[in-house]
């Protein structure tokens, strides 16, 4: 597997394999070394790594930076990869589009995620949290990831998309979301084949869902998107399928990992868990701190549309940038004592949801779900412990940071 390194001394200390289990378990010491030694670094593979909060914030908001997904994929894989189903589908989503297509696609779904819409969902989400805990409360144990962190946001996004309850079992069983396609280390042929199969299977279902909502329209996001596609000037059939798939995946995966990573962080810092139990009013602020401390999304990509200077380094046009969100969130220039978890920390503005025109649509929804989960756990299972908190099972992904399982017990 390719390593990523500084091309000049002290290169050895900055070499890393982003899929190495040791790095995945704890990338933050490496981020610190990189931020201190080479905060703007061109790798031997030809892309740039940026790690400081100020530089990352600029790359996300400045119009000199864009997505250019197709150009990035060609530089990484060669010309032949754009026809791969997983790549072709992702290329149709708002996640990787530049204006005007990004503006058009995002505008079709923005109203489903307004602050008022999300606030109106609070009673339903609280009910769902209680239902998930009711399923396991008498057992005295659960896998947090399987029984709570995954199920809750999947049900919420199924509600929003209008996925009928009788169709949800496969989605509740597990996740096929894979961030590898967005990572700087290219996927293997085997990984790409699996991503293609997952994309095609999802496409078959979401096409069926669209047909269902054409016949039986409901008050849901899929119905709204189908109407836009039928109007003919807002959305193509391919964009319809790809963006419903994106909304489903992005609508649960990052929230799942926020809950899992956050609960693990709190139990690795028991003084902070006790602090929340003593004062649950801190929970909304704690969610911001947990987003900062161990972000569900670790990187995002950009391409320079013009020459730009970052940290005293001049970067030419058409250069690939990998913004290390997890490193920016622990920049001591932005956050004093950044490696310490502090649920009362002030002035937190984590990069975890990105920024600029691509700022995560579902950020407020994810925050609400996490708040209600932590509040319910404190109220109903205050003596919960995580037996494997020091040796957790991390998923093999650099972009999407999350656990594959997280056993918990209580009495």
Image (tube, grey):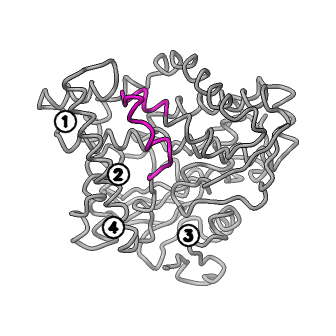
Above/below status of 301 relative to 410: below
Gap between marks 3 and 1, in whole Å?
36 Å
Residue 245 figure quarter: top left
Q: Mark 3 or mark 2, which is nearer the start of the sequence?
A: 3
Element marked by disc 2 = strand
Mark 3 or 4: in front is: 4
Image quarter (top left, top right, bottom left or bottom right) of the C terminus: top right
Gap between marks 2 and 3, in whole Å?
24 Å
Residue under numbered circle 1 = 235
Mark 2 or 1: in front is: 1
Q: Position of residue 14 (x, y in %)?
A: 62, 76
Element marked by disc 3 = loop
Q: Are marks 1 and 4 in contact (CB under 8 Å)?
A: no
Element marked by disc 4 = helix
Residue under numbered circle 3 = 18
Q: Are marks 3 and 4 in contact (CB under 8 Å)?
A: no
Q: Position of residue 337 (x, y in %)?
A: 79, 50
Q: Mark 4 or mark 2, which is nearer the start of the sequence?
A: 2
Name the residue nearer the viewer: 79 or 154. 154
Gap between marks 3 and 4, in whole Å?
21 Å
Residue 309 among magenta residues: no
Q: Residues within 10 Å of mark 2 (few under 14, many from 20)?
A: many
Q: Are marks 2 and 4 in contact (CB under 8 Å)?
A: no
Q: Mark 4 or mark 1, which is nearer the start of the sequence?
A: 4
Q: Mark 1 or mark 2, which is nearer the start of the sequence?
A: 2
Image point (87%, 27%), residue name: 278
User: Which residues fall within the magenta stretch?
Assistant: 155-176
Q: Are marks 3 and 1 in contact (CB under 8 Å)?
A: no
Residue under numbered circle 4 = 193
Above/below status of 42 relative to 27: below
Gap between marks 2 and 4, in whole Å?
28 Å
């Amino acid at each position: 597997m390719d390593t990523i390194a500084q091309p000049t001394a002290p290169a050895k200390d900055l070499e890393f394999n982003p899929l190495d289990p040791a790095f995945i378990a704890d990338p933050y010491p490496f981020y610190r070394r990189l931020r201190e030694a080479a905060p703007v670094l061109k790798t031997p593979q030809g892309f740039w790594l940026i790690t400081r909060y100020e530089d990352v914030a600029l790359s996300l908001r400045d119009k000199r930076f864009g997505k250019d997904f197709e150009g990035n994929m060609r530089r990484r894989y060669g010309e032949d990869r754009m026809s791969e189903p997983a790549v072709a589908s992702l290329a149709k989503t708002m996640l990787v589009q530049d204006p005007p297509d990004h503006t058009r696609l995002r505008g079709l779904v923005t109203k489903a995620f307004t602050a008022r819409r999300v606030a109106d969902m609070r009673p339903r989400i609280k009910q769902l949290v209680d239902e998930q805990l009711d399923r396991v409360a008498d057992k005295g144990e659960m896998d947090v990831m399987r029984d709570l962190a995954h199920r809750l946001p999947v049900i919420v996004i199924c509600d929003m998309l209008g996925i009928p309850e009788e169709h949800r079992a496969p989605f509740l069983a597990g996740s096929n979301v894979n961030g590898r396609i967005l990572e700087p280390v290219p996927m293997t042929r085997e990984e790409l084949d699996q991503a293609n199969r997952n994309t095609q299977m999802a496409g078959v279902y979401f096409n069926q869902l669209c047909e269902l909502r054409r016949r039986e329209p409901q008050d849901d996001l899929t119905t709204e998107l189908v109407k836009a596609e039928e109007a003919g000037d807002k959305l193509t059939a391919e964009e319809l399928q790809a963006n419903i798939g994106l909304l489903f995946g992005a609508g649960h995966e990052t929230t799942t990992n926020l809950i899992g990573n956050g609960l693990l962080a709190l139990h690795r810092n028991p003084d902070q868990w006790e602090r929340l139990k003593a004062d649950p009013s801190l929970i909304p602020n704690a969610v911001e701190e947990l987003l900062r401390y161990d972000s569900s999304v670790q990187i995002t990509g950009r391409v320079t549309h013009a020459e730009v200077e970052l940290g005293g380094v001049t970067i030419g046009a058409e250069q690939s940038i990998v913004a290390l969100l997890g490193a920016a969130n622990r920049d001591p220039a932005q956050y004093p004592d950044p490696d310490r978890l502090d649920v009362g920390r002030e002035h937190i503005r984590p990069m975890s949801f990105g920024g600029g025109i691509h700022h995560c649509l579902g950020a407020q929804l994810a925050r609400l779900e996490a708040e209600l989960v932590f509040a319910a756990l404190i109220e109903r299972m205050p003596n919960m412990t995580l037996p494997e908190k020091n040796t957790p099972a991390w998923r093999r992904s650099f972009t999407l940071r999350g656990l594959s399982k997280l056993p918990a017990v209580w009495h």
